[in-house]
Amino acid sequence: MNPRTGKRRYTVIGLLLTALMLFPVYWMLNVSLTPQHDMRKNPPDLFPLHPTFEGYQAVLDDQFPYLGTSLLIGLGTVALTLILAAPAGYSLAKLRPLGGGALGLGLLIAQMIPGIVMAMGFYGIFLDLGLLNSWWGLIIADSTISVPFGVMIFTAFMSGIPGELIAASRIDGAGTFRTFWSVVLPVSRNALVTVSLFTFLWAWSDFVFANTLDGGGDLRPITLGIYKYIGNNNQEWNAIMATAVVASVPAAVLLVLAQRYVAAGVTAGAVKD
């Protein structure tokens, strides 16, 4: 078979598979623009022939506070995760603390614990501490998912930093913290972006922790907003789909902007020189 023909065939297959996977996203967008009176047409319109933005207006009226809370929780979770995971990754990668191997194994095991099990454990702890129905409680809970992942990513990435670079900073008089802050972090940009992105996406899309720990709070994330909206407006599908579209935009934008950093950060440490 001609190599060029083979490449074209694989390209067509790839495009078809991509279109198949993205069709639910397109249909979500199509329904969000469909007027309510056309919602039950049979067969349905494949394109919004008479688009309406009533659903998006409803999102702005009803869901905007939930979006703000999700943004606050996401950014707070990113900050807490980086504060904990970056120094821990540097320690495991370069300082070789006693028991570092056992700690790495513990972090790997922590990734395997189902979220609902952790949520029930947090419920009892937060009930005693008075942290239920609070956005900072969700930040703490979401961080328990992202910190182990962040430590593993930072450890893998920082293991590839040349030891000569760190030794040179120590010769210049930099201590452990100064070396970490001024030398290691600046060259760990890919890992920082990768951990920040996945942490934000986890916090943004979390439902289990939110529903268990913040079901009755004044500040609730967008996942609970969508859940409540579906329950109260189960016939207004254009508004429901518009809410889903708006909630998906931040994740999509972040993935597009950070994809090259994520590719480098995730594969760091896979190949040794």
Image (cartoon, grey):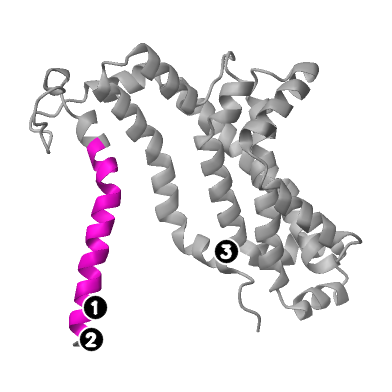
Callout 3 crowding tier (Cα within 10 Å): few <14, some 14–19, many ≥20: many
Callout 1 crowding tier (Cα within 10 Å): few <14, some 14–19, many ≥20: few
Q: Secondary structure at mark 2?
A: helix
Check contact, mark 1 vs mark 2: CB within 8 A. Answer: yes
| Residue type (three-letter) at the residue carrying disc 2 | Pro
Per the rendered image, the range of residues in magenta is 4-27
Check contact, mark 3 vs mark 2: CB within 8 A. Answer: no
Callout 2 crowding tier (Cα within 10 Å): few <14, some 14–19, many ≥20: few
Return the residue at label 2: 3
Image quadrant holding the N terminus, namely bottom left
Say which quarter of the image contains residue 217.
top right
Q: Residue at x 72, y 50 (%)?
A: 109
Q: Residue at x 27, y 58 (%)?
A: 17
| Residue type (three-letter) at the residue carrying disc 1 | Lys
| Residue type (three-letter) at the residue carrying disc 3 | Gly
Mark number for residue 265? 3
Q: Position of 194 compared to 51: left or right?
A: right
